[in-house]
Image (cartoon, rainbow, N blue to C red):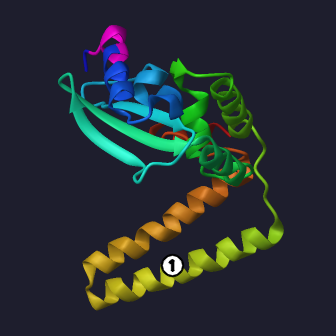
Amino acid sequence: MNCTDLKIVTISGIVMDRLKEPSSVVGLLLIGSFARGDADDYSDIDLMAVLEHPLNFHREQDLIEGEKVEILYDTVIEIEQYLAEEEGCFSRNVSNMLADSRVLHAKDGRIRELIARGRAVRGSEMLVNQSEMRMHQYSIQDFLTDAWRELNAGNVVEFHRNAELPIDTFIAVSAKNCGVFLEQPRWFIPELRAR
């Protein structure tokens, strides 16, 4: 996708103008592939609007200035809760978004604090304990049994759905044991192999 920084700034200005109470916007962040610098022809522009007060919706997709734009709307409190939940976990979606983000608008220092917290959570150690590992082992066995049952019954759709679960669980457990957390799927397997 050929999208310049100037166009992103123009789009962010339009998004800011659309918000009913621009004063309740704590910040606007560029997230996703454009923020990371790995956007391609299929990439959309991802923005995160950090708000004081919640809206009636959390996500919006639109065509702005000829570009596909996806906007996430979350309050400071919601983001802080997401980060607290992600600490020590395998899946770290919000912390990855924040850690790789670019600030387009900041009302005050809270945006920089959220980004710093996101980076800290992304780099934090995962918490693994023996009972959790045992639970995952039993889950994998159950998922495999369900997949086998569906395959023998000729139910291809249910087999496919059930066959993905043990693979996903096995990858999550293996990654956790290696201290790898979930980033972009295309980056994940080489990192796991390297360990």
Position of residue 70 measured from the top left corner of the image (x, y, whole percent): 34, 37
Question: Dividing the image into 4 quarters, which one contains the C terminus?
Answer: top right
To which residue does mark 1 refer?
143
**Could you say which quadrant of the image residue 108 lies in?**
top right
Q: Residue at x 30, y 31 (%)?
A: 44
Q: Which residue is drawn at 43% across and 49% down?
A: 58
Of the pair 174 and 53, the residue shown nearer to us: 53
Q: Can residue 106 be seen in this view?
A: yes
Of the pair 69 and 88, the residue shown nearer to us: 69
Q: Which amino acid does label 1 sit on?
A: Phe
- Does dot 1 land on a helix, a strand or a loop? helix
Q: Report whether 143 appears left or right of 148.
A: right
Question: Dividing the image into 4 quarters, which one contains the N terminus?
Answer: top left
Q: Provide the residue span drawn in magenta.
A: 3-9
Using the image, determine if residue 167 lies above or below residue 94. below
Q: Residue at x 41, y 28 (%)?
A: 33
Q: Residues within 10 Å of mark 1 (few under 14, many from 20)?
A: many
Using the image, determine if residue 135 lies above or below residue 92. below
